[in-house]
């Protein structure tokens, strides 16, 4: 699994070394450059045998190379003001930063969380796997959700 370093070049102590997950390759760019696959600037990449944990990825500010995309359509806000989305498989997801406008959360690429019980007002549960790239689609009418 390949991860891009968006904040600094990769150097000793600047990337996780999880037990049993061997580093396969490390490449630093000559300068920070735009990487189309992750849609952001990066200093280089590191490749591991297996996926990193969510906390390792976040703690070292690494962005995974998405292995697949998931299209999310905005449905509205739940009773706690969290942004609710539905993917093409019917699963509900939530963005948790209720203080920011939804568009800011989407542009920042906040991590969506599954909705407990797949219910509109369900509690946020597990974060989306780091090898999935969420693609935020345009809004739909709330009536469409109630008919589904």
Image (spheres, rainbow, N blue to C red):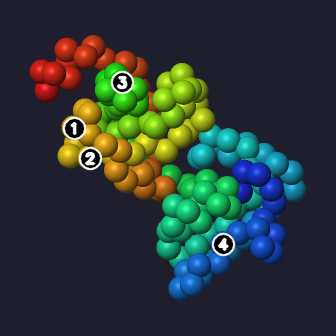
Query: Which is in the foreground here, disc 4 or disc 3?
Result: 3
Marks 4/3: CA–CA distance: 36 Å
Mark 1 sits on what residue?
119
> Which residue lies at the image location 71% right of the left edge and 57% below the top edge?
5
Circles 2 and 1 in contact, beta carbons < 8 Å: yes
Nearest to N terminus: mark 1 or mark 4:
4
Q: Residues within 10 Å of mark 4 (few under 14, many from 20)?
A: some
Mark 3 sits on what residue?
77
With respect to residue 26, does 110 lie above or below? above
Marks 2/4: CA–CA distance: 30 Å
Q: Which type of secondary structure does the marked residue at label 2 adopt?
A: helix
Q: Which type of secondary structure does the marked residue at label 1 adopt?
A: loop
With respect to residue 22, does 54 lie above or below? above
Query: Which is in the foreground here, disc 1 or disc 4?
Result: 1
> Which residue lies at the image location 44% right of the left edge and 36% below the top edge?
95
Q: In which quarter of the image is the C terminus?
A: top left
Q: Can residue 2 be seen in this view?
A: no
**Left or right, residue 148 beside residue 60:** left
Q: Position of residue 100 (x, y in %)?
A: 56, 26
Q: How crowded is mark 2: few (under 14 residues within 10 Å), some or many (20 or more)?
A: some
Q: Where is residue 85 in the image (x, y as percent from the top left)?
A: 34, 32
Marks 1/4: CA–CA distance: 36 Å
Mark 2 sits on what residue?
116
Marks 2/1: CA–CA distance: 6 Å
Nearest to N terminus: mark 2 or mark 4:
4
Mark 4 sits on what residue?
16
Q: Residues within 10 Å of mark 3 (few under 14, many from 20)?
A: some
């Amino acid at each position: 699994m390949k991860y891009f370093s968006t904040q600094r070049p990769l150097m000793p102590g600047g990337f996780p070394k999880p037990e049993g997950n061997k580093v396969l390759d490390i490449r630093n760019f000559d300068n920070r450059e735009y990487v189309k696959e992750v849609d952001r600037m990066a200093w280089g990449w590191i490749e591991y045998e297996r996926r990193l944990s969510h906390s390792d990825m976040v703690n070292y500010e690494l962005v995974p190379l998405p292995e697949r995309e998931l299209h999310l359509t905005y449905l509205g806000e739940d009773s706690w003001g969290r942004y609710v989305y539905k993917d093409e498989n019917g699963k509900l997801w939530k963005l948790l930063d209720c203080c920011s406008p939804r568009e800011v959360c989407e542009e920042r690429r906040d991590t969506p969380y599954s909705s407990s019980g797949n219910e509109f007002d369900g509690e946020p549960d597990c974060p989306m796997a780091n090898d999935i790239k969420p693609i935020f689609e345009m809004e739909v009418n709330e009536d469409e959700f109630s008919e589904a």
